[in-house]
Amino acid sequence: MTHQPVSWLILFFAIVFEVAGTLTLKFTEGMTRLWPTVLMFAFYLVSLFGLSVAVSRIPVGTAYAVWSGVGTLMVAVMGVLWFKEQVTVLRSVSTLLIVIGVAGLYLTGSHQ
């Protein structure tokens, strides 16, 4: 399966929309607020569409690992910066392990 840089760019934007959807969850108040809930679903829909396009050229295991891993990292960072969530050693080490795992998948050639 061949891939092109554009597939990785699409995957990056899918990650950004996934992160936006996840961060918007905070404002839905248990999906009781209409517009934040609609926005959250829209963000997730765009993200999943982008992921589906990306996996046509990137192996699904790699694309999903990057999508979920980078998304997790971005949400964790935004949680600390935006929502003032607590930074602990265990959370930091766990996040680092996710990054190492995603990088390992990419570097082992499973992206080709």
Image (cartoon, rainbow, N blue to C red):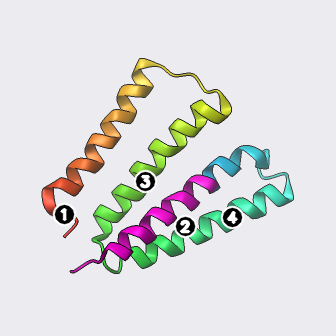
Q: Mark 1 or mark 2, which has the lower sequence index?
A: 2
Q: Secondary structure under badge 1? A: helix
Report the side of 8 relative to 38 (left or right).
left
Q: Look at the image and give the residue range highlighted in magenta.
A: 1-20
Label ID, residue 47 = 2
C-alpha span from label 1 to label 3: 16 Å
Q: Mark 2 or mark 4, which has the lower sequence index?
A: 4
Q: Is residue 29 magenta?
A: no
Q: Mark 4 or mark 3, which has the lower sequence index?
A: 4
Q: Mark 3 or mark 2, which has the lower sequence index?
A: 2
Q: Which amino acid does label 4 sit on?
A: Phe
Report the side of 73 relative to 104 (left or right).
right
Q: Position of residue 62 (x, y in %)?
A: 29, 62
Q: Mark 1 points at which residue?
A: 110
Q: How crowded is mark 1: few (under 14 residues within 10 Å), some or many (20 or more)?
A: some
Question: Cβ–Cβ below 8 Å for labels 3 and 2?
Answer: no
C-alpha span from label 4 to label 1: 31 Å
C-alpha span from label 3 to label 2: 11 Å
Q: Secondary structure under badge 2? A: helix
Q: Which of marks 2 and 4 is in front?
A: 2
Q: Name the residue under label 3.
A: 68
